[in-house]
Image: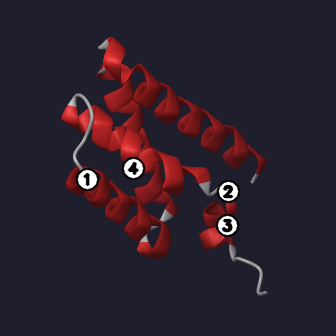
Amino acid sequence: MRPLGARHVWLSITPEPERELPRAVATLRAGGPPDPAQVELETARAEALVLRGSRRAWRRYLAEAHALASSAAEPELADARAVVEDVVHNHNNLELAL
């Protein structure tokens, strides 16, 4: 396996965002349980960023997700908010090690 260059090192941080973030972001955007199409759209966005995006674009996506979480005060969004906050917090901590 070829090592990642400095430009792509962010891709090795953690796989959780790609798995957990789309449903949480779709939930926050919908203001409640998202329909499957909304989850699929967020999944496609995250996948495109991971496969073809840049570190800057990924960080913008995380910042957008965090802004959604920060503005969501409804109790039914607490789980989605917690997922986003956890993923962003973990990402930021892991990125410090790079």
Q: State the residue position of label 2.
A: 13
When the figure is inspected, residue 28 is found, relative to residue 42, above or below; the finding is: above
Q: Which mark is residue 9?
A: 3
In percent of width and height, residue 57 lies at 41, 58
Q: State the residue position of label 1.
A: 36
Q: Residues within 10 Å of mark 2 (few under 14, many from 20)?
A: some
Name the N-terminal-most of marks 4 and 1.
Answer: 4
Q: State the residue position of label 4.
A: 22
Name the residue located 35 percent from the left edge and 41 percent from the top edge.
25
Disc 3 to disc 2, C-alpha distance: 7 Å
When the figure is inspected, residue 40 is found, relative to residue 97, above or below; the finding is: below
When the figure is inspected, residue 70 is found, relative to residue 29, above or below; the finding is: above
Q: Is residue 8 left or right of residue 80?
A: right
Which amino acid lies under the numbered mark 2 shown in the image of this protein?
Ile
Q: Is residue 12 left or right of residue 19?
A: right
Which amino acid lies under the numbered mark 4 shown in the image of this protein?
Pro
Which amino acid lies under the numbered mark 1 shown in the image of this protein?
Pro
Name the N-terminal-most of marks 2 and 4.
Answer: 2
Which amino acid lies under the numbered mark 3 shown in the image of this protein?
Val
Circle nearer the viewer, 2 or 4:
4
Say if mark 4 contacts mark 1, CB within 8 Å.
Answer: no
Name the residue located 78 percent from the left edge and 48 percent from the top edge.
97
Disc 4 to disc 1, C-alpha distance: 11 Å
